[in-house]
Amino acid sequence: MAASPLDPISPTSWTFAETYVVEDDVLLAARARAEEVGAVAVGSGAGATLRFLAAVLEARAVVEIGTGAGVSGLWLLRGMRPDGVLTTVDVEAEHQRLARESFRDEGIAPQRVRTIAGRALDVLPRLTDGHYDIVFADGDKREYGAYLAEALRLLRPGGVVAFDNALWHDRVADPAQRDDETVAIRALTQEVTATDGLVPLLLPVGDGLLLAKKEWVPEGDD
Ligand SMILES: C[S@@+](CC[C@H](N)C(=O)[O-])C[C@H]1O[C@@H](n2cnc3c(N)ncnc32)[C@H](O)[C@@H]1O
Ligand SMILES: [Mg+2]
């Protein structure tokens, strides 16, 4: 029988696509630090997607929610403009200490990374409206709806919000799964498509990356 466009790709092709962009020693060392503390890092497929996004947008200013040990931060910094600044928030100061080691390994100038230790919903309201090209969310999944509201305020028109783990280990697509994190991510996926002024895309890369572009507002409109 002929394959339908909705047939899942084989595990072989999935692995080929996920690992198409090969990680170097700096990323592998960051990944090892992440494993030490259980800060689950984005896979190389999602990482390469974040780098691509930052490169396409020529990003100067990015907010990251959930620094971990710096794996996603490294990918973002590699795509951003050479003078771009990553502002990254994590409730665990120890995770951020490891991330700073990862950024040092990469030779990133210290002024290019602003690490802020604290709970995302305490820190984000202090950041400047409309200043950021990308907001990448990978913190507390139960707070994803609140992160969307903050991201829409923080992004410049034309900026993009990205949520990691949008498929949440196959649970989001399964209505029988009703734990708090799954319910929150499922609600987010619905809210993103229902919100005017967003261009949504759910990429089945890694554990799912939900993207939404904040549309340009024509001049003269509110
Ligand atoms: C999945 S890990 C981040 C991994 C990282 N983005 C990467 O790919 O390398 C999630 C991180 O979010 C942090 N976190 C959890 N809840 C948070 C909150 N409410 N505010 C800020 N950070 C939070 C955790 O301490 C952890 O380091
Ligand atoms: Mg994640």
Image: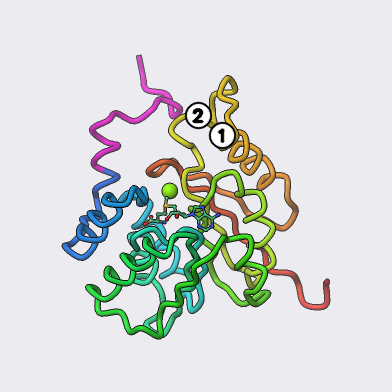
Magenta range is 1-16
Q: Identify residue for label 2.
A: 171
**Residue type at numbered disc 1:** Thr
User: Contact, CB < 8 Å: mark 2 with mark 1?
Assistant: yes
Q: For this view, does 180 lie left or right of residue 75?
A: right
Q: Earlier in the sequence, mark 2 or mark 1?
A: 2
- Residue 39 vertical placement versus 182 (above, below): below
Q: Is residue 6 magenta?
A: yes
Query: In percent of the image, x 37 and y 22: which residue is there?
Result: 3
Q: Which SS class for mark 2?
A: loop
Quadrant position of residue 79: bottom left
Q: Tell me the crowding category of disc 2: few under 14, some 14 to 19, or many 20 or more residues within 10 angstroms, Cα based.
A: some
Residue placed under numbered mark 1 in the picture: 182
Q: Is residue 33 left or right of residue 219?
A: left
Q: Residue 15 falls in which quadrant of the image?
A: top left
Residue 181: image x %, image y %? 56, 37
Relative to 179, is 207 above or below? below
Mark 2 residue CB less than 8 A from any atom of ligand 2: no
What numbered label is drawn on residue 117? Answer: none
User: How is the structure coloured here?
Assistant: rainbow
Q: Position of residue 90 (x, y in %)?
A: 48, 62
Please tell me whether mark 1 sits on a helix, a strand or a loop: helix
Amino acid type, label 2:
Arg
Relative depth, front residue between 153 and 55: 153
Q: Is residue 107 magenta?
A: no
- Give the quadrant of the N terminus: top left
- Please report the residue visible at 55 percent of the width from the left and 71 percent of the height from the top: 133
Residue at the image position 24 percent from the left and 50 percent from the top: 20
Identity of the residue drawn at 37% across and 51% down: 39
**Mark 1 Cα-neighbour bin, 10 Å: few <14, some 14–19, many ≥20:** many
Q: State the predominant SS element of the stretch in magenta.
A: loop
Q: Position of residue 153 (x, y in %)?
A: 69, 67
